[in-house]
Image (cartoon, grey):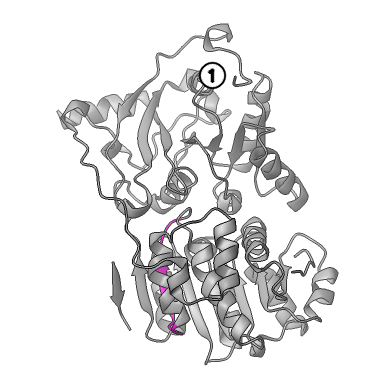
Amino acid sequence: MQTHSRGYGQSGSSRNGRSASSRPGKRPGAYSSHARPAQSGNFRAHRSEHTGGRGGYGRKPALPTFNPSRFINTNPKSQTETPEEAYVPTHTFGTFGVDIRIVQAITSMGIETPSPIQDKIIPEILAGHDVVGIAETGTGKTAAFLIPLIDKTLREPHRQTLILAPTRELAAQIDQEFRRITRGMGLFSVICVGGVNINPQIHALARVNHFVIGTPGRVLDLLKRGNFAPKRVTTVVLDEADRMLDMGFIHDMRAILGATPASRETLFFSATMPEEAKRMVSDFLKHPVTISVKKKDTADGIEQDVIAYHPDTKFETLLELLGKKEYSRVIIFGAMKHSVEKLAKQLGTYGIKAESIHGNKSHGQRTRALDAFKRGHSTVLVATDVAARGIHVDDVSHVINYDLPSTFEDYVHRIGRTGRSSKRGKALTFVPATHVTKTIHDKR
C-alpha cells in the first residue's frame, strides 16, 4: 500500500551441543504456547526489568512490564491458517528502465524479481521524489534505494549520495552490496564509521566518492573537521532511522541534514514511525511519498511462539532447545552486554559453538564474531539489541528472545533477523512459567 502524503578508509570499486539427556541439571518440562501472528501493539511498549534467575545471571526474578500475553493462544486448534497469495510485482528489474549493467549485476546475485519494497519504491526514487519507506529488515530495502541511486549516478556522475546507518556493521553491509552491484562501473564509495582510525577515512574523502556511507557520529565529526563537504550531497539516505533515534543520534542527524543543500533528495527508511521520526520527516522531507510494506508482505515466514521457563532452570531450557537438530543457525538476544558475554561462554562449556557481539567489543572483534557466524564456524550468535543492528545473515533458523525486549519496536527488529528473503524462520520468546499460567487462567 502506498500513500501520497505529498570506513575503514576504503574506497573502491549434527549440532555441536550435547543431547539433552546427557546434560546435567533438572529438566524443567518446558513447554510452548502457539502464538498468533504479531500485530503492532501485541506488546506494551514499556521499559522492562528483565527476567533473572540463573538464566539472568544473579538478578532477582522480576516480572517485566512488557506484556507477552497476546502471544499465548489458549485454544491452538481453533486457529486456521488461510494461505495468502504471493506478492506479484508490477515490474521486473528490466522494466524499471535502469542501466542494463545494474540489471545484470542483480541477476547474477540470484535475485530474479523485485521484492514488494523494491517494486514500489524504485520508481519513486527514479522520479526524484522524497520517500518514506516503512519496512522491516530482510525486505530488500538496501537494494531498493541502491539500484535507483546507482542508476542516477551513472547518468549524472557529479551526484553524491550520503547514507547514514546506525552501526558500523550495517554501514559495511551496505557498502558490500554497493560494490557487488557496481563492479566495473567506475563508481566509488567510502565508509566513515567510528571505532576505527579516522585518518584513512580523511585520506579517502580527499578522493572522488560517489557514495559516502557512515554512522552519524563519525560523519558529523568529519564534517566539523572540514574533511567532508556536505554541500556536494545530492541525496541523503537515512537507513533504519528509528534505531538511530533510539541510539541517541537525533542531534547528529539533524545537524548533518541541516548542513546539506535544501535541494537534496531525502530517503527515510524505518521499521517503525515513533513521534520523533515523524517530526524529522516533517522537518526535512519535501512532500514525501510514503511506501508502507505491510507485515503480511514481509513476515509470513516467521512463526512466533513463547517458551515458558522456571527461573532455576532457564539456562537448561535453552540448552534443551539448542540440542535439537532444527536449530541450525540461531541468534539469541540478551538484555545487557555482560550477560550476553557470559551466556555465550556458558554455552561454550556445553560444546555449543557460540559467538557474542555487544557494545564492549571492538569493531574487529564484532566483525570476526559475525564472520564466524556467517561462515558456519559457530552456530549460535548471542547479541544485544544495539549490536544486532548490523546483523544481516540469511538462513537464520531461529531467533530466541532469552531476555524480553523493552518495546514492541525492539521485538520487531529482533524477529526480523529470521524469515528473510522469502524463507521460513521461527521466533521464540522466553516468558516466566508463572506468567504464562496466569495469562491462560485470566483468558479462561
Nearer the observer, 96 or 45: 96
> From this viewpoint, is residue 251 visible?
no
Q: Position of residue 114 (x, y in %)?
A: 43, 61
Q: Name the one closer to the observer, 424 or 344.
A: 424
Above or below, 38 relative to 30: below
Residue 111 position within the rendered picture, expressed as x and y whole percent measured from the top left: 51, 56
Residue drawn at point x = 75 percent, y = 65 percent: 7
What's the magenta bit mostly, secondary-structure-wise?
loop
Taking the spot 83% from the left edge, 64% from the top edge, the residue there is: 197
Q: Is residue 44 visible?
A: yes
Kindly identify which residue carries mark 1: 323
Image location (x, y in percent) of residue 47? 42, 49
- Report the quarter where the N terminus lies: bottom left
Q: Is residue 26 above or below residue 59?
A: above
The mark tally for this picture is: 1
Say left or right for 93 vs 351: left
Q: Is residue 56 magenta?
A: no
Q: What's drawn in magenta, residue-wise?
A: 127-136
Identify the amino acid type marked 1. Answer: Gly
Query: Quick check: 24 above or below 320?
Result: above
